[in-house]
Image: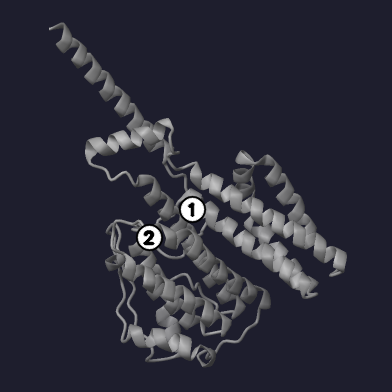
């Protein structure tokens, strides 16, 4: 009888501990979304992913500051420095300051300096090059730290708790990896949105390229008959089936994008070189993120996503090639909304806005 009482007490205590762990983990992973319009598409946003995506954009713009100065174009260097300042809002600076007050202080000072570059002298080029490389390295490290904060750290109490709960409820034990890949995928999507926004500004399209429904308007106006789209996003959980796209010939349109990109820019001309440079650099950044952060996570994925990953990779390559050829906004939207987004959604099991 005494032994039975001890067992009952132990079981009750274990239940209370596990209940507490569950509650703590729920609080630990709760999202506190930004109140700013970041996502033109329909992926459900996440605060950490938004932060990581903005830092990716800052790094690309900082790189453009240095590159333009090296080419003796102080005006364009200033333009990209202003973009850096606009991305680093008080909210983002505060986020950085929470973990790294020195970096926050340094980047505020550096942003001010970059907007006031006096000339493209050799000394200025060396100074800016050093500053950009230093900031980009430190910002990259800050993103790693930020994403790690929402993961169960190896060997700590939470990691053990997750493994215990996983074994009890039949979990696979890959929660940390899955969460990490989803955060990286959402950050990637944020960068792709920035590509569309900047490309739209570069050609002064006059509409939101991140809004998939605008493809109908562009298709009717710029190249009638080349595309017939009906964008309907359901309220289901995830999967490319939620992003239903009716097209006359998706494969034909996709092939046309890369083969004839230079001759498809009907009705639009380049009016903003700074925005075009940003779109080009951000597409390159997206490719870098995919190759270094996203693609490796699919190697150990239990789902068979090889086909989706291949399609996604092809879409990213087409996006870079088409932007380099100054393809029409329709072609760029086509690549993003019919190749990149659906395959990103399926590969990393992202959620859609309801």
Residue at the extreme left of the image, as rendered = 1
Residue sitting at 43 percent across and 37 percent down? 28
Note whether 35 is above or below 202 in the view shown: above
- Residue 329 horizontal side relative to residue 339, left or right: right
Residue 117: % across, % down: 82, 63
Based on the displayed image, in which of its 4 quarters is residue 63 positioned? bottom right
- Which quadrant: the N terminus? top left
Residue 285 visible to the viewer: yes
Q: Locate residue 70, reporting x and y percent.
A: 77, 71
Q: Nearer the viewer, residue 183 or 276?
A: 183
Instruction: Note whether 52 is above or below 345 in the view shown.
Output: above
Q: Which residue is pictured at 39% across the width and 86% down the height?
A: 253
Relative image position of residue 11 (x, y in whole percent): 22, 20
For the C terminus, the quadrant is bottom left
- Secondary-structure class at tag 2: helix
Gap in Å between the C-alphas at discs 2 and 1? Answer: 18 Å
Instruction: Identify the residue under disc 2.
Output: 298
- Please tell me whether residue 215 is drawn above or below residue 299 in the rendered image: below
How would you rate the neighbour count of disc 2 (Cα within 10 Å): few for under 14, some for 14-19, many for 20 or more?
some
| Circle 1 crowding by C-alpha within 10 Å: few under 14, some 14–19, many from 20 | many
Instruction: Say what secondary structure mark 1 lies in.
Output: helix
Q: Earlier in the sequence, mark 2 or mark 1?
A: 1
The residue beneath circle 1 is 49
């Amino acid at each position: 009888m005494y032994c039975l009482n001890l067992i009952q007490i132990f079981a009750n205590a274990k239940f209370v501990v596990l209940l507490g762990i569950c509650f703590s983990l729920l609080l630990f992973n709760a999202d506190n979304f930004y109140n700013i319009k970041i996502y033109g598409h329909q992926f459900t946003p996440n605060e950490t992913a938004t932060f990581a995506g903005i830092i990716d954009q800052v790094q690309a713009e900082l790189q453009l500051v240095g590159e333009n100065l090296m080419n003796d174009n102080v005006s364009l260097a200033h333009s990209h420095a202003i973009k850096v300042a606009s991305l680093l809002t008080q909210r983002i600076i505060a986020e950085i300051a929470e973990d790294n007050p020195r970096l926050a202080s340094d980047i505020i000072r550096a942003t001010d300096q970059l907007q006031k570059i006096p000339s493209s002298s050799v000394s200025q080029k060396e100074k800016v090059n050093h500053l950009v490389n230093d900031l980009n390295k430190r910002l990259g490290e800050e993103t790693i730290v930020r994403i790690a904060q929402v993961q169960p750290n190896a060997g700590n109490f939470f990691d053990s708790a997750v493994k215990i709960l996983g074994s009890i409820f039949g979990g696979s034990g890959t929660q940390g990896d899955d969460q990490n890949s989803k955060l990286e995928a959402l950050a990637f999507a944020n960068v792709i949105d920035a590509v569309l926004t900047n490309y739209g500004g570069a050609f002064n399209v006059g509409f939101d390229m991140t809004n998939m429904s605008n493809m109908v308007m562009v298709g009717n106006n710029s190249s009638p008959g080349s595309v017939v789209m009906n964008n309907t996003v359901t309220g289901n959980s995830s999967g490319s089936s939620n992003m239903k796209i009716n097209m006359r010939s998706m494969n034909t349109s996709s092939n046309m994008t890369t083969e004839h990109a230079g001759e498809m820019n009907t009705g639009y001309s380049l009016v903003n070189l700074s925005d075009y440079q940003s779109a080009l650099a951000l597409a390159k950044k997206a490719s870098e993120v995919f190759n270094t952060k996203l693609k490796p996570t699919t190697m150990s994925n239990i789902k068979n996503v090889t086909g989706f990953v291949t399609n996604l990779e092809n879409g990213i390559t087409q996006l870079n090639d088409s932007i380099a050829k100054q393809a029409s906004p329709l072609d760029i939207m086509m690549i993003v909304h019919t190749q990149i987004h659906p395959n990103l959604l399926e590969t990393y099991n992202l959620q859609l806005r309801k």
